[in-house]
Image (cartoon, rainbow, N blue to C red):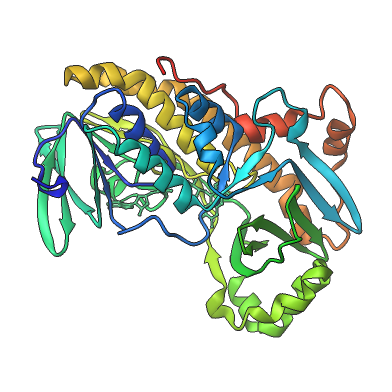
Amino acid sequence: MSDHEQSQTGCIVVGGGPAGVLLSLLLARKGVEVTLLEMHRDFDRDFRGDTVHMSTLEVLDQIGLAEPLHEIPHAKMHRMEINAGGRTVVVADFTRLRTKYPYIMMMPQSDFLEFLCKRAEQYPSFHRVMGAQVIDLIRDGDRIVGVRYRRDGEEQELRAPLTVASDGRFSRIRVLAEVEANEQTPPMDAAWFRVSRRDDEGLEGGAFYAGSGRLLVMLVRPDEWQIAYVFPKGDFQSLREQGIDQFRASIAELVPWLGDRVDEIESFHEVHLLKVGSDRLQTWHQPGLLFIGDAAHVMSPVGGIGINYAIGDAVEAANVLTEPLLRGEVGGDALAEVQRRRERPTRMAQRMQGLMQDNIVLRAIREQDFDLPAPMRFVLATPFLRDIPARIIARGFSRLRLQAP
Ligand SMILES: Cc1cc2nc3c(=O)[nH]c(=O)nc-3n(C[C@H](O)[C@H](O)[C@H](O)COP(=O)(O)OP(=O)(O)OC[C@H]3O[C@@H](n4cnc5c(N)ncnc54)[C@H](O)[C@@H]3O)c2cc1C
């Protein structure tokens, strides 16, 4: 019987992003029968963030996977810097943190996810079904007992004591389960595009450029720069109306060394709008169902921490649920415990993102001569405070650890 013909498993994980893939691996290595359903045929995606934070590397180190991961081509971001008005300010210096991995690893997310899946495939209890789009939940009274999914035009049913919804920011399971979220509206959107990168252009420091009412965030990839052009919410149409020449010129003005490559952006067809959102479910679980990652809480891109929080949920879900799943009985208390462990750090991170949006991002996209606000400059200039931003970006608001690696 192939994986997609299974009708019963120990845990269904819907969505093969960082949350779903890591959770599947952690459960499978403990012997839980787990089936990962991913609607795409591969992990190749544009513009999803390629960051692997030190907290993730530390968890992978606990299970002996950090070193093999480093064998895959990657870059290391040791610092985050903001360039404004010709000055460069280091906002986070990871090299000063006490850790084996004092950097953010930059690796195409598809390579990272494929690496985790290959490791999971070493355990016979792991099953993955690619091209499987979940379309419905199966209920028994008020309990979710499985899902219906479509693959190759055929509908299948899969049942399990627990379904984990890790299907991301446009979660279908959220809609099917009729859950409610508290929403914030970040004041900006972003347009993503790419230009080529030269071999000698490294990335010791993550690059942010601010000035003339614009903010660019640059992420390094093996042979290209992925760039987010950040602007006030709802302004994408007026950006388009100004024309591609104006768009290119404003990039070249802010980052002069990119001037020789902006012509690679041929039209707005190559510029992808990301409507920035942020929300958090009130309750992350129902009988037989748990939400994790972006499906539980869409994170604003500020600080580039969405992947980190998705991974954190997967680690705590594995810590709490492995034993109940091995027994085949997952009660509401265990699901509530996952939310209890993860909700506070997530709420704090979203609050911090809100503060940064209002005090840094908004100013950067409104003011001609941007400078960091005075309290931030004070923090960065004070020896015992200056590493707080680096710590929050790298580790979040709670220390991640696998309890039984
Ligand atoms: C443009 C952009 C840039 C970003 N940059 C960064 C960054 O630099 N650093 C960072 O930390 N975060 C970044 N993020 C945020 C980050 O991508 C998310 O926070 C993170 O991917 C969430 O992980 P997840 O596993 O919860 O969900 P996702 O990564 O969204 O994965 C969800 C998966 O579920 C699958 N799926 C959806 N519906 C179904 C269904 N019905 N059936 C089966 N499968 C389904 C999807 O195909 C997808 O593979 C960025 C986000 C965007 C949009």
Query: Toward which corner of the image does residue 289 lie, by quadrant?
Result: top left
Nearer to the camera, 288 or 3: 3
Against 265, is 233 above or below?
above
Q: Residue 36: where, in percent of width, then height?
A: 27, 42
Q: Residue at x 74, y 55 (%)?
A: 202
Q: Residue at x 79, y 47 (%)?
A: 81
The answer to whether 264 appears left or right of 313 in the picture is right
Q: Residue 3: where, in percent of width, then height?
A: 16, 45
Q: How many marks?
A: 0
Q: Residue at x 60, y 32 (%)?
A: 54
Q: Residue 403: where, in percent of width, then height?
A: 43, 15
Q: Residue at x 25, y 57 (%)?
A: 131
The reply to whether residue 179 is in sight is yes
Nearer to the camera, 366 or 196: 196
The reply to whether residue 296 is in sight is no
Query: Toward which corner of the image does residue 382 lie, by quadrant?
Result: top right
Nearer to the camera, 153 or 373: 153
Q: Residue 178: where, in percent of width, then height?
A: 27, 44
Against 336, is 295 above or below?
below
The answer to whether 221 appears left or right of 324 in the picture is right
* Quadrant assignment for the C terminus: top left
Against 281, is 330 above or below?
above
* Quadrant assignment for the N terminus: top left
Nearer to the camera, 91 or 1: 1
